[in-house]
Amino acid sequence: MQLIWIGGSTAQVKKISITGKGLIKLTVIICAFLFLTGFGIHFLGYRIAFHFSPELTRAMGGAISIQQKEVIETGYKENVQKLEANIAQANQKIEELTVIKDQFADIATPASVKSKTNELTAK
């Protein structure tokens, strides 16, 4: 396909040839330009929005500031310490219950069974 352009009073005639490869190249160039422009606008817009309105930026994309991150991490560390303390208490309670269980097993075991187990362990 050809386009013919006749310009103004000088009557210059310009011919422009349009080919399939030319259209594909033009389409790729336009798409790449639009993609890069959109990416640049998004990146810069996101930085500007974060600078002026961090709450809006966090609502839109989940971004937080370094101070907010440190506050969250401090909360997590406190929760981990509490859980570690709870686990230590649970382990202590398990040890106490094991001692009580052994005492009850010792009381509940008849003397004849105790003597037989002592003989078997001595051999």
Image (cartoon, rainbow, N blue to C red):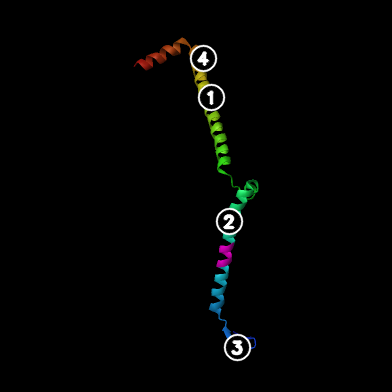
Q: Answer with mark 2 or mark 4, whichever residue precedes in sequence.
A: 2
What amino acid is at disc 3? Gln
- Rendered image quadrant of residue 12: bottom right
What amino acid is at disc 4? Phe
Image marks 2 and 1: residues in contact by CB distance under 8 Å:
no
Q: Which residue is mark 3?
A: 12
Taking the view exactly as shown, the residue that stands out farthest to the front is 9
In the picture, measured across the screen, residue 81 lies left or right of residue 61, that is left
User: At numbered mark 2, what does the secondary structure look like: helix, strand or loop?
Assistant: helix
In the image, is residue 79 above or below residue 112?
Answer: below
Residue drawn at 59 percent across, 66 percent down: 34
Taking the view exactly as shown, the residue that stands out farthest to the top is 111
Q: Answer with mark 2 or mark 3, whichever residue precedes in sequence.
A: 3
Q: CA distance from mark 3 to mark 4?
A: 113 Å
Q: Which residue is mark 2?
A: 44
Q: Which residues are magenta?
A: 32-37
User: At numbered mark 4, what does the secondary structure look like: helix, strand or loop?
Assistant: helix
What amino acid is at disc 1? Ala
Q: Which residue is mark 1?
A: 90
Mark closer to the observer (3, 1): 3
- Residue 75's x, y, as percent? 57, 34
